[in-house]
Image (cartoon, grey):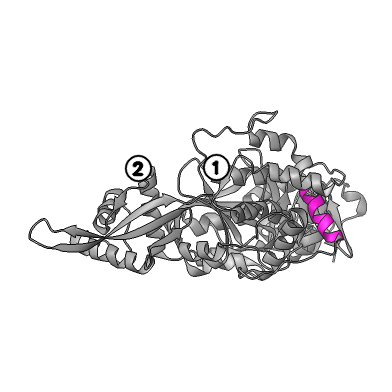
Amino acid sequence: TANPAPAAVTKSQVLLPCGPVPISDSAAEIFRRLQERNSAFHRGGQVHEVTCDTDGRLRLEPIRPEAFRSRIEKLGPTAVVIKTPRGKTAIQEKRPTGEDCKAILASTEAREILNPIATIFGAPVLIPRGDDVVTLGKGYHPDRGGIFITDGETMDDIPLEDAAGRIEDLLIDFLFVSPSDKTRALSTIISPALRFGGHIRGNIPIHSNEAAEKQTGKGYNLEVTAAIYNERPALVTQKNSGVGGFDEALQQRLIDGRPIIQMDNLRAKLDSPFLEATLTAPGEVGCRVPHRGEIYIDPRSFFFCATSNGLESTPDLAARSCIVRLRKQPATFRFNRWPEGDLITHVRAGQAYYLAAVHSIIRSWWKAGAPKADPIGHDFREWAATVGGIIRHAWPEAAPLLDGHRDAQERTANPSAGWLRSICIAIAEAGRIDERFTATDFAELSTERGIAIPGLGEQLDEAKAKRAVGMILARLIPDESVAVDEFEIERRIETREREDRPGSFEAKTYRIRHQKP
């Protein structure tokens, strides 16, 4: 093969594939230069770069061939080797074509030379290494499939009691349905660090904040957690299937690479096999969005969370959830005043300290032999055992992690229980707590509020609605009372006189109350 004379090529020039220069040689030189600058990475079978969102957050973006032209040109003057009429070789300036870019991006050199990357983190990550745990700081790290840390300050360890106290203080403005819901809120704060650092090899549930009323702080609570990790949640909203649907939005967030993905304000029916598969995937999942090829992403570096009000999930999704139930603070409640203003501003101002507190808790637990708790009560046993052990180590007085959790999971997967909870919410919002209601009243309220009655479909016949509601109540409230999350529904059988003819009949009435938190 004829080669140009060494003097013919300057050090800065980038040779494109042409003539005696094969695609592999050109690609190798281009990717070496990109790798040295940390400006391109290999991920899921494609070449990615780190870009900036409109809100200033960095994300991963697959490089399209038409965009790759300018990336090559930034490396230096581009040229090709040509043969002169006299049979010699010469260098001729030439801009890369779209075909050049496609060929180079598809080459094996991209995978062989570029650093692999799985996720971008905005702050240091604590990972297990041998018999110890170490902190990864700003920059690129090959651990966990490739980690790129964009920012963040590392701090010394904080004594366990101080660290645990400061983390628990972040929850003082939130009202939880039960003490175990507060414990699960602590797990929401701790679990991202375990996920990002690979301390748990198995699956981690989606952490779902639920509330019966508005302005309970369910989204705010998750934003506080994200702020500890110098992140903002990447939102996925519930849409109809098809173009721009829920699954497509979720796949785009996985491609973006930001580590905290939040399903926001979920309601009604959510049936996403892709989400369920993502939560239990043992390896990569295929993600496809318009105008892109399929990209294979490992979801085991992501932390998934959600906010919901009356979500009806599938049994599989319910089993993959960690549910935290919140209530609205009373009107007389005085929220804590933080030096910087609100809680989010306070956490962002002290982000390095709060992350160091989380890492200190995990490091202290690790040094204590990484004790595990009994995982009974959740399908994700490794997560339940690990988080339960950390909670018991750092907060020995905390309520058990999973007390009452199976009931919450079963309710989200039970349309009838979900309907009854929606009725309770509607009555609470109307200020009619402690009043007496009949099955007919519940049927009418369902129609007024647009609350679908399970088993009735679109049928609006009053008689059928009343019968359907009566059957649901008979199944759900066989005794004198039943608890549905933060509500208690009391059933009473009364003897009433008939209005249309002599005689009496037995009538069932129901009273809804708030359970004491």
Picture coordinates of residue 201 (x, y %)?
Answer: 73, 67
Category of crowding for the residue at label 2, using alpha-carbon neighbours closer than 10 angstroms: few (below 14), some (14–19), many (at least 20):
few
Q: Marks 1 and 2, how far apart in space?
A: 20 Å
Q: Quadrant of residue 227?
A: top right
Q: Is residue 205 rendered to the left or right of residue 330?
A: right
Q: Which residue does the image show at 72% across and 51% down from the upper left? A: 120
Picture coordinates of residue 98 (x, y %)?
Answer: 64, 53
Dot 1 amino acid type: Gly
Q: Which residue does the image show at 87% across and 59% down from the upper left? A: 367
To which residue does mark 1 refer? 217
Whether residue 84 appears in this view of the structure is: no
Whether residue 130 appears in this view of the structure is: yes
Foreground disc of the pair 1, 2: 2
Picture coordinates of residue 303 (x, y %)?
Answer: 65, 56
Q: Is residue 45 rendered to the left or right of residue 211?
A: right
Q: Answer above or below: position of 180 versus 351.
A: below
Camera-nearest residue between 152 and 460: 460
Dot 2 amino acid type: Ala
Q: Quadrant of residue 142?
A: bottom right
Camera-nearest residue between 146 and 103: 146
Q: Which residue does the image show at 78% across and 46% down from the upper left? A: 163
Picture coordinates of residue 34 (x, y %)?
Answer: 79, 51
Secondary structure state at the residue bearing disc 1:
loop
Q: Answer above or below: position of 478 versus 447.
A: below
To which residue does mark 2 refer? 430
Principal SS element in the magenta part? helix
Q: Answer above or below: position of 486 versus 152.
A: below
Q: Quadrant of the N terminus?
A: bottom right
Start and end of the magenta stretch?
356-367
